[in-house]
Amino acid sequence: MSKIIVITSGKGGVGKTTTSASIASGLAKRGYKTAVIDFDVGLRNLDLIMNCERRVVYDFVNVINGEATLNQALIKDKYTDCLHILPASQTRDKDALTKEGVGKVLDELSETFDFIVCDSPAGIEHGALMSLYFADEAIVVTNPEVSSVRDSDRILGILQSKSKRAETGDEPVKEHLLLSRYNPIRVQNGEMLSVEDVKDILAVPLLGVIPESQSVLTASNQGVPVIHQEESDAGQAYSDAVARLLGEDLEHRFLEIQKKGFFHRMFGGKA
Amino acid sequence: MSFWDYFRTTKPATAALAKERLQIIVAHERAQRGKPDYLPQLQQEILDVISKYVEIDRQDVQVQFDRNDDCAVLELNITLPEE
Ligand SMILES: Nc1ncnc2c1ncn2[C@@H]1O[C@H](COP(=O)(O)OP(=O)(O)O)[C@@H](O)[C@H]1O
Ligand SMILES: [Mg+2]
């Protein structure tokens, strides 16, 4: 039996796709057979972040419609052996994701994979609902900013009422908060909500804090999920989040202003 | 006051305000969750019916919806004016 994890947020541009790529890669790096699915029909991007955009032949909707088999559509990851990517369709519309169709694909993936990571589109419309419907766990990606926090709470409400687990009265979807684009300097200046503030408001267990980091941009430029940049702050923060997801108890890092070392100041760091 | 302090004190700590506003709106929206969306209209129609017989204000009709494990309770509380 595999575990289905949705990466969701309500709001767009908060770091869902960045997170999906890194969490899926991190699980695979540890040897878990992992599939990551792009649910953003019409706005495919996970392929770019994972550097497989030129190898897409068939997509998620093709599989749902029986136009391709799952094996034909799954793309083997460049960096990690146990990881496969199922790209979104760039041309169809979101209604192509039927509940039956998505359920069938997830069932088939469950036979081979330990983890299925679902990258949700923004919003609370059909595509977003389909990506969270079958989830066992949810990583709610939130930026320390008013609209993102409110939208996250809205998504939490939807997980608690519209997911399959909620509908069937099963054990609720396990919720995790992932605070991303965190800037300790701005927090110290009183301009940005702190980790504690967001935890107080949402009351969801904290999976990790990803700092606002230049390395995320350079990683996406190259098509390497940032978790592979092991020297970078964001990469390390994602590795910690993966460890916590697997049950390890690690202290949160990067919550304080990073004191740059002498060499860092002299020559500039990559992080 | 030094030159730098000047900059520091003119920057209000807006994060505290953001937190306060979010706590209020999130509490409000969580309280609304799972309630049927016909409640405001139901309240209005009850008000209309009663107004045919007695003069009352909107706030005299309280509609409360609660759901527990096995049933939902709709509680109506109508305050009539004193004679
Ligand atoms: N920790 C971070 N630091 C800096 N930039 C980030 C971080 N996380 C995401 N970004 C940037 O934010 C933008 C949106 O990220 P993305 O993962 O595509 O969000 P979403 O999938 O939620 O729309 C991208 O340009 C990405 O590079
Ligand atoms: Mg995205």
Image: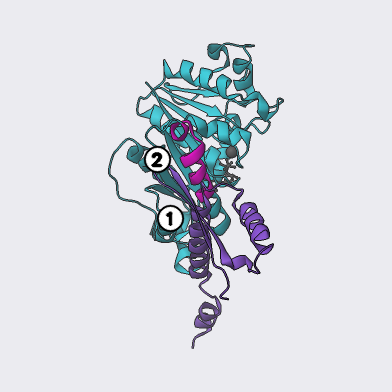
Amino acid beneath label 2? Asp
Task: Name the residue beneath numbered marker 1.
Answer: A264
Q: How is the image coloured?
A: by chain
Chain that the image shows in purple: B
Give the residues drawn in magenta, as a range: A152-167
Residue plotted at (43% across, 48% down): A233
The answer to if A176 sits in the magenta stretch is: no
- Image-quarter location of ligand 1: top right
Residue A173 is drawn in which quadrant? top left
Query: Mark 1, residues whose alpha carbon is within 10 Å: few (<14), some, or many (≥20)?
Result: few
Task: Give the letter of the chain under mark 1.
Answer: A
What label does residue B70 carry, if any? 2
Residue B57 locus on image (x, y percent): 63, 69
- Name the foreground residue: A140 vs A18: A140
Visible in this render: residue A178? yes
- Name the foreground residue: A111 vs A58: A111
Residue A139 is drawn in which quadrant? top left
